[in-house]
Amino acid sequence: MIFHSVESLNILIAPFLFLIILMTILQVAFAQASPKEINVYPGQSLYTAISKSMLGDTIVIHEGVYRENCLIVEKPLRIIGVDRDKTILNGKGLGGFGIYVIGTNSVEIANLTIRNFGVDGIAISGYRISGISVVNSEDILIRNCHLYNDTSIYADFARGSTLGVYGSSNITIADCIIHDSECEAVGLFSSSKCLVINCNISRSVAGIVLSSSSETTVVDCNISDFYVSLSGNPYHNVEVGIQLINSRNNLITNCNVYRSIIGLR
């Protein structure tokens, strides 16, 4: 009699135990899947923060100088500095590139100073890059960033940009300051539906270069002082504010281009 009572009790309890276990699993899974905020302070690793982050997380970088390079973003993330002028990614002496976004969407990079990056003899996905590069991605926002002293030495079948976009769409570059680059400041290659708005660009080989790109808008930008000449550079002695190569259906409006041999070509 007791045996049957215990057996009946187990039958009654089993579904409730199953529900409790299932709810626990779902709660853990939901907690892991929910976007979270990851704070990074000086002395901590940006590379580690990006590697351990989950889809949709926000990485908040606090004021300080971070000497890291080759930061690869392959998932939707927000990478946000606390203060643009005091949150600095410095590549001096490290070589390589700064931030490389590849094969993803829904990435935001904001409020950072990125300086002293260059790719010396290294090709990434067939391109030479420095500063920030976006490859085969879409819906990317880069805003309120200051990029300078980013260099790139060119090789065969390679291009370089302080801020380069390759084979991507729906890229917005807004409210950025870009200067003193030994390559074009902003390069858009085989890309479409991009927006460059309210940027100040100066003292580089070229300001904005669109190559095999379409349906892109450049608006409210100040572009000036293109006097840099590098021997062996594909844009050697270009000294041009905005250059379009094999591109169509693009809109350039309300921009100031000055102190350049060629304003628009």
Image (cartoon, rainbow, N blue to C red):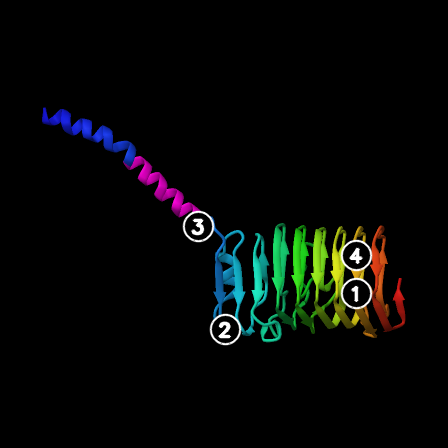
Q: Name the residue at the left extreme.
A: 1
From the viewer's side, name the closer residue of 113 and 156: 113
Compute the Cα span from label 2 to label 1.
35 Å
Residue 82 coordinates in the image, percent (x, y): 56, 70
Query: Bounds of the magenta span?
Result: 17-30
Q: Looking at the picture, which amino acid does disc 3 mark?
A: Gln
Q: Which residue is mark 3?
A: 32
Q: Which residue is mark 2?
A: 42
From the viewer's side, name the closer residue of 176 and 243: 176
Give the SS element for disc 2. loop
Which class describes the residues within 10 Å of circle 1: few (<14), some (14-19), or many (20+)? some
Which class describes the residues within 10 Å of circle 2: few (<14), some (14-19), or many (20+)? some
Q: Earlier in the sequence, mark 3 or mark 1?
A: 3
The disc at residue 220 is 1
Q: Is residue 203 magenta?
A: no
Residue displayed at 90% across by 72% down: 261
Give the SS element for disc 3. helix
